[in-house]
Image (spheres, helix red, strand yellow):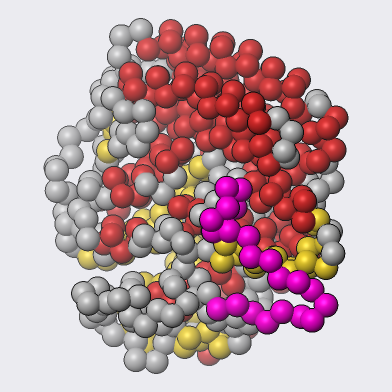
Amino acid sequence: MPARSEEELVEELKREHPELLVEAVIHRSKRVSIVAKREKILELARLLRDKYGFTHPVSAGAVDYIKEGRMQMIYYLMNPETRFMLMLRVDLPRDDPRMPSMTEIWNAMNFHEREAWEMFGINFEGHPNLTHLLLPPDWRGGYPLRKDFRGEGIRP
Amino acid sequence: MSEPEVKPEVMRISWGPQHPMSGQTRILIDVDGEVVRRIIADIGFTHRGIEKILENRTFIQGIVPIERMVMADTANIALGYVQAVEEALGIEVPERAKWIRSLICEMGRINSHLYAFGLQVECTGYFPAVFLWTTVDREVLLDLFEKLTGARWSYSFFIPGGVRADLPEGFRDEVKRAVKYLRRRFQDYWDAMVENPLFEMRNRGVGVLSREDAIRLGATGPVLRGSGVDMDVRKDEPYAAYGDLDFKVITEKEGDCLARLKVRFHEIEQSLNIMEQIADEIPGGPVRTKVPLFPRSKPGVEALSRVETSRGELGVHIFTDGGLKPYRVKINSPTLRNMYVFERLAELDRVLVADLPVVLYSIDPWYLDCDR
């Protein structure tokens, strides 16, 4: 399996799997973004790992775009051969932020998804252990990294 | 974290968070006699919400809180943030400033690796003196930091657009003297510890992580390189002055605790070489460009900067919305990735209870970095 450069990856994905993507862009050298459709994300993730060699999970996190009413979950991935940073993104509606868990594809997303769950309230379906990671186990104060979070009056 | 169920044939032990060797975290261990069947890391005791704090600070104010992530290695952490700010705001950095940044980053790396080395030796239970040696020897570096930046720790020396001050008079000679002294000391460490059969016995073949598992589980830094993967951001994606400097990426193929220790040891040697090169070849010129005190961002820009800290790759992803403060800062911390590897190690290799501190400290955990 030949390793693909940034341009080759983006072109091939657009040509062969347009039904899985919303868009694919190269920001600058070594930074590639792919926005996936929420219902197709597992299929695309499996393709990226098995066909394109993105076997090295780096991290994952979310951004809350409150004005647009959406949240974006970002998975940072790397291919040990080509070593550019691939950001696999999914847009989620803010009133129903749920998506399939990536832990069955990249085990190591376990911690990162737990963090996104407690900080943003994104529900990962099929996650083996969706419990608090950084916050106390009895935390009831809401989702701290959401933009409408107010810290006053919270007693953990 | 709520505790998962215990199987009837094992006993669960809670180690930490108030134990001198566990650090500020709790580790649940399921043991079957002497053998560890399962490790569960309960992190989050030092969670301070740095990502949220950064959303409420201007771009330059953010340097101070983010440095508190890793005190032994503040230079590398701050550089990750400052580079992301520079990319998001489109700020150029003069050549000399980049070289000074690399110099301080390498000094920070030695400082941090010394601490890790001292702790791992302490964990093996043999030589309590070595931790004191490393603590004394890092004074040499701390004195240099003080002379250059005015502070021994958390110096906030990097700012968007360059560094705060130029090298003081005679600093290059002092760097060379320090390198000479440290080289001699590291030879002593190598002879006394790494070549020592008792120390080797406690570390060789313990906590083995194979190359495939290291990649699959997302290990980073010396843990990844100790398993034979030559990934180093300084080489893969040169930043600061690393494109012009001559150094090697250190790997060891065994993947055990000794391999990870050796990687750190040889990295210190490479860092000393880099320090000497910079002292000899640093170009002249200005050390900072003019940047307003409260720079305003453009809306909808994002910048991801990657740096190689002493624990592995740090990523700082900044999103802007056109204001004076970042809209969101995502920090990809290296220790969080390595803690997951540590959790899985009991399934990959036969880990004994007595070896657990060695295995934990061979990944060089820094919980403030892990929890942010």
Relative to residue B33, is residue A101 depicted above or below? Answer: below
Say left or right for B195 vs B266: right
Asked whether B19 falls inside the magenta stretch, the response is yes
Residue drawn 78% across the image and 46% down it: B256
Asked whether B91 falls inside the magenta stretch, the response is no
Predominant secondary structure in magenta?
loop
Relative to residue A108, is residue B142 depicted above or below? Answer: above
* Residue A126 is at least partly visible in this image: yes
Residue drawn 71% across the image and 79% down it: B6
Residue drawn 30% across the image and 53% down it: B88
Quadrant of the frame with the N terminus of chain A: bottom right
Say left or right for B352 vs A128: right
Q: Residue A6's x, y, as percent?
A: 55, 59
* Residue B223 is at least partly visible in this image: no
| Residue A15, picture quadrant | bottom right
**Residue stretch in magenta:** B2-22
Say left or right for B247 vs B147: right
Quadrant of the frame with the C terminus of chain A: bottom left
Total number of numbered discs in the rendering: 0
Q: Residue B285's x, y, as percent?
A: 28, 19
Residue drawn 50% across the image and 9% down it: B177
Instruction: State the residue in front, B172 or B34.
Output: B34
Q: Residue B43's x, y, as percent?
A: 53, 63
Relative to residue B277, is residue B130 depicted above or below? Answer: below
Relative to residue B10, is residue A28 depicted above or below? Answer: above
Q: Residue A76's x, y, as percent?
A: 52, 64
